[in-house]
Amino acid sequence: MKYLSSSTARLMMASASLIGLFASVYLLYTYVTGAPITCGLVKGCDIVRSSRWAYTYGIPRPLLGVIFYVGLFFLLILRAAVQRRSIFVWLFRLTLLAAILGFIESGFLFGVQWLDLRAFCLWCLISALAATVIAVAAISDRDDESILTQYQELKRYLILFLFFI
């Protein structure tokens, strides 16, 4: 089985984290302001937002998504910028752990929408897809040094971020 190169896997994780961040920020905005959710063909966003699963201890779930995606993007930047091998390895492990936890949370919430609510939120599905891409790319990532220089990798993240905003 052929794996992605480490730099490609990290670029995929960074791209997916920005897509997930966009979906989470939009959902957070609608949760906080009470604005209507544009849900497209799926038409289950309001059911999901009004469910008991929409908040965890009074915290809107989209806020947890924002924290996850920002944190993951920040970890990738740190990994590209760090000089010491021992710190790089710990950041690699932390990235892998975050990716797995995000995938598990997204899978759980997908199951809630499918089995309990019987309604799907388009933006939640986009976030779940982003978390899945992150997990798959994280499994393909390695803790070896990338063929890209640190400068090149940081430059790719900056371009990606500027494209996002």
Image: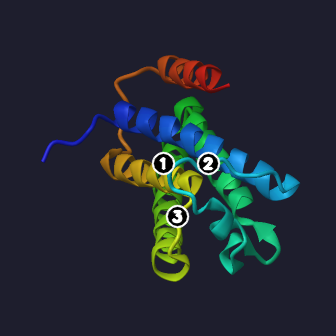
Mark 1 residue type? Ala
Looking at the image, is mark 2 or mark 3 earlier in the sequence?
2
The x, y position of residue 77, in whole percent, is: 59, 34
Badge 1: few (under 14), some or many (20 or more) residues near its Cα, within 10 Å? Answer: many
Frontmost of labels 1 and 3 is 3
Report if residue 145 is visible in the image.
no
Question: Mark 1 — residue?
Answer: 130
Would residue 116 appear left or right of 69 to someone viewing this image?
left
Mark 3 residue type? Phe
**Nearer to me, 80 or 120:** 120
Frontmost of labels 2 and 3 is 3
Looking at the image, is mark 2 or mark 1 earlier in the sequence?
2
* Residue at image coords 48%, 48%: 130
Would residue 28 appear left or right of 114 to someone viewing this image?
right
Against 65, residue 76 (above or below) is above
- Mark carried by residue 69: 2
Against 97, residue 56 (above or below) is below
Against 49, residue 16 (above or below) is above
* Residue at image coords 54%, 53%: 122
Mark 2 and mark 1: span between their CA atoms? 9 Å
Looking at the image, is mark 1 or mark 3 earlier in the sequence?
3
